[in-house]
Amino acid sequence: SVSAFLLNRSSDLRDDRIRKLVEASRSKAKRDKRKALDHFHHRLTMDGDERTETAMQDLRSLRQAFRQLDKIAPDLNRVMIEDIQQRSEELFQQCVSSLEKTLQLWKTADSLASEMARKPNLEQREKLVGDVVQTVEHMSRTLASVQGITSRSDGDARLQHLRGELDQSLEVAKKVEQRVDSLLTGARVQNSQQINKP
């Protein structure tokens, strides 16, 4: 009947509108995240250390490549590829967080007057930058290894091994960042105690 057709038609139009709104919302969220990363990437120029900017550029490129893994290696174990993609995303987020802390440490060191006061912050920053650079290299090697797997038969064992390596990298990155977190928290507590002394 005509009324049933019109009812279905209006339902389809409503569904289509909702789908378009959801898609628009998702693409706006993606754009906002990309803008925030662009802004952060630009802020990394403040420290005058090319390694942090280069690491950020590499991280973004690697993240994109890992996201494309299922298209690059369509014959490999889907579940393992998804696991590797998830771990690479976690490593990306961890490295961005670490780079944020390198900036904090640099700003703190830059605000201190004496070399003796600056040294501990710069040393921690150096460790953190080195860790991020190492993680980027490891992610790059992992990506190349996955892309180099040609057959499903030996692929599963190699993917399992690579997944384990990414897990280890993540653990190391988290430990380094926790150490820096406690240093930053300790420095804030010490500074407030100094200020509050009668």
Image: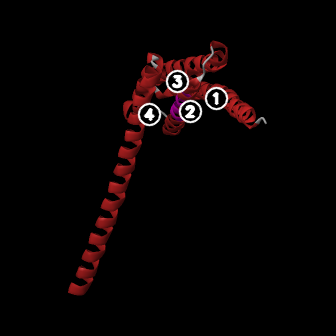
Point out residue 78 in the picture as x, y percentages from the top left corner.
48, 38
Closer mark to the observer between disc 1 and disc 2: 1
- Indicate which disc, 3 or 1, sits on the residue closer to the N terminus: 3
State the SS at label 3.
Answer: helix
SS type, badge 4: helix
Q: How many marks?
A: 4
Residue bearing the label numbered 1: 177
Task: Choose mark 1 or mark 4, whichever is in front.
Answer: 4
Secondary element at tag 2: helix
Which callout, 4 or 2, points at the residue further toward the start of the chain?
Answer: 4
Residue 88, disc: none
Q: Nearer the viewer, residue 97 or 187?
A: 187
Quadrant location of the N terminus in the rendered image: bottom left
Q: Give, as a three-letter code, the residue at label 1.
A: Glu
The percent coordinates of residue 152 (x first, y second) are 48, 28
Within 10 Å of the Cα at label 4, are there few (<14), some (14-19), or many (20+) other Cα atoms? some
Distance of label 1 from label 2 (alpha carbons): 8 Å
Residue denoted by label 3: 154
Residue hosting label 2: 94
The answer for how far apart the CA atoms under marks 3 and 4 are is 40 Å
Choose top left, top right, bottom left or bottom right for residue 174: top right
In depth, the one of 60 and 19 nearer the eye is: 60
Are discs 1 and 2 less than 8 Å apart at CB? yes
Check disc 4 and report the residue beneath it.
40
CB of mark 3 within 8 Å of CB of mark 4?
Answer: no
**Which residues, given as a range, are shown in magenta?**
92-100
Quadrant (top left, top right, bottom left, bottom right) of the C terminus: top right
Measure the C-alpha gap from mark 3 to mark 1: 35 Å
Q: Nearer the viewer, residue 150 or 14?
A: 14
Q: Earlier in the sequence, mark 3 or mark 4?
A: 4
